Image (cartoon, rainbow, N blue to C red):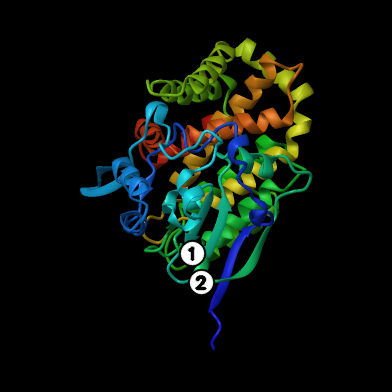
């Protein structure tokens, strides 16, 4: 009897510690989120369900939409975009009445993010738009590290895996590793780490062809020798860039009220340079030191998870721009949350602010594409990143 073939997958050191909190979750992914897409295998299982009443309920819950010119099956959400299978105890009735494998790929995967590129490179992570994942990643007393683990090929069965038809770019590993190295440099301020990452990303974006890797390594050597400079933009320009992102996000009339209210809070507290500067000084004096490791781990996770340009797209700069848009918004949320309620502020509340910001920003491709369209071409992306970083 043969053994199943395995392969290496890269993942955060605590990836397998994640546990869904179910009924205790303060922001259930079964309410008010994106469409729950039903894959063909899930549909087939639902058609074969033996319990007639439950099969009828499943059939009634399925709706059909069009995506990229083809029909896709989704769950017909109820009032407040609540999944009809969500029970009052916070658990899924499909899972409770049958078994986990009968869930759709979307439900079985989230908040796990899974990549398996052509050529065999595999990565998996968790998304901090989930409250439990956000606390696990952000509220820890050690820097996030990443490990390789050998897993059986069957770990992907029934799960939503990205990148299957793409080849990860040959220089992606070097770029991602160096960005992580910069973020881990505690001799630099958070702002300087991000500026240094930004300078590196856009230099990499200018390299192409067979000698790209050589040029990247050459740049890293020059950077380590102290030959690279990066200057912040003016406070006025930085504030204008942050406010433009917030205002674009606020334009969506279907935003959940608590998220829209947070946007209003941030916009109010960034109404003028003087008040904005005073608020930042208050945050810096009483909260910033407690969040050094917090922000390091957030950025490490996002770089590991997102900085994966492929040969087919080669969008290193655009990927970085999206990352900075989300970061600028969640940073504003955390700062404003502290400024408005400093007496009962905790790092756990900071994690909740990041979670909500990531949920309503990173998962909304329409919004991120709107920002990118407003910015323009590559040169515009780079300048806008610098403005958001400040």
Q: Residue furthest bottom?
A: 1
**Label 2 crowd bin: few (<14), some (14–19), many (20+), radius 10 Å:** few
Q: Label 2 vs label 1: CA separation?
A: 7 Å
Residue under label 1, please give it: 156
Q: Position of residue 53 (x, y in %)?
A: 34, 45
From this view, report whether residue 323 is shown above or below residue 272. below
Mark 2, secondary structure of its residue: helix
Q: Nearer the viewer, residue 127 or 221?
A: 127
Q: Position of residue 151 (x, y in %)?
A: 58, 70
The quadrant of the image that shows the C terminus is top right
Residue drawn at the location 53% of the way across and 37% of the way down: 324
Mark 1, secondary structure of its residue: helix
Q: Nearer the viewer, residue 210 or 120?
A: 120
Residue drawn at the location 43% of the way across and 44% of the way down: 318
Q: Residue furthest left?
A: 69
Q: How many marks?
A: 2
The label on residue 178 is: none
Badge 2 vs badge 1, beta-carbon distance below 8 Å: yes
Is any part of residue 304 visible from this angle?
yes
The label on residue 153 is: 2
């Amino acid at each position: 009897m043969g053994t199943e073939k395995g392969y290496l997958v890269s993942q955060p050191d605590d990836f397998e510690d994640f546990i869904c909190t179910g009924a205790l979750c303060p922001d259930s992914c079964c309410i008010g989120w994106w469409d729950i897409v039903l894959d063909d295998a899930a549909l087939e299982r639902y058609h074969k369900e033996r319990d007639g009443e439950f099969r009828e309920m499943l059939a009634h819950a399925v709706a059909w939409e069009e995506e990229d010119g083809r029909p896709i099956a989704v769950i017909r959400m109820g009032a407040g975009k609540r999944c009809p299978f969500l029970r009052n105890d916070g658990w899924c009735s499909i899972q409770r009445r049958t078994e986990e494998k009968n869930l759709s790929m979307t439900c079985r995967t989230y908040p796990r993010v899974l990549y398996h590129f052509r050529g065999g490179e595999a990565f998996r992570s968790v998304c901090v738009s989930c409250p439990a994942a956000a606390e696990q990643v952000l509220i820890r007393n050690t820097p996030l590290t990443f490990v390789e683990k050998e897993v059986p090929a069957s770990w992907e069965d029934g799960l939503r895996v990205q990148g299957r038809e793409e080849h990860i770019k040959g220089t992606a590993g070097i770029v991602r590793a160096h960005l992580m190295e910069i973020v881990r440099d505690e001799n630099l301020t958070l702002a300087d780490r991000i500026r240094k990452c930004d300078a590196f990303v856009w230099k990499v974006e200018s390299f192409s062809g067979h000698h790209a890797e050589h040029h990247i390594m050459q740049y890293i050597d020059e950077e380590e020798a102290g030959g690279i400079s990066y200057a912040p933009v003016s406070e006025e320009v930085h504030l204008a860039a942050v406010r433009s992102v917030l205002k674009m996000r606020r334009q969506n009339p279907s935003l959940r009220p608590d998220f829209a209210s947070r946007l209003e809070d941030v916009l109010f507290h960034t109404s003028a340079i003087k008040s904005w500067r005073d608020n930042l000084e208050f945050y810096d004096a009483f909260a910033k030191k407690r969040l050094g490791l917090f922000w390091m781990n957030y950025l490490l996770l996002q770089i590991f998870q997102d900085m994966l340009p492929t040969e087919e797209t080669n969008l290193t700069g655009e990927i970085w721009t999206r990352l900075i848009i989300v970061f600028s918004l969640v940073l504003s949320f955390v700062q404003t949350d502290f400024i408005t309620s400093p007496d009962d502020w905790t790092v756990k509340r900071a994690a909740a602010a990041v979670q909500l910001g990531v949920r309503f920003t990173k998962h909304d491709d329409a919004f991120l594409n709107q920002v990118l369209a407003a910015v323009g071409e590559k040169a515009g992306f780079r300048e806008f990143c610098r403005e958001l970083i400040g």
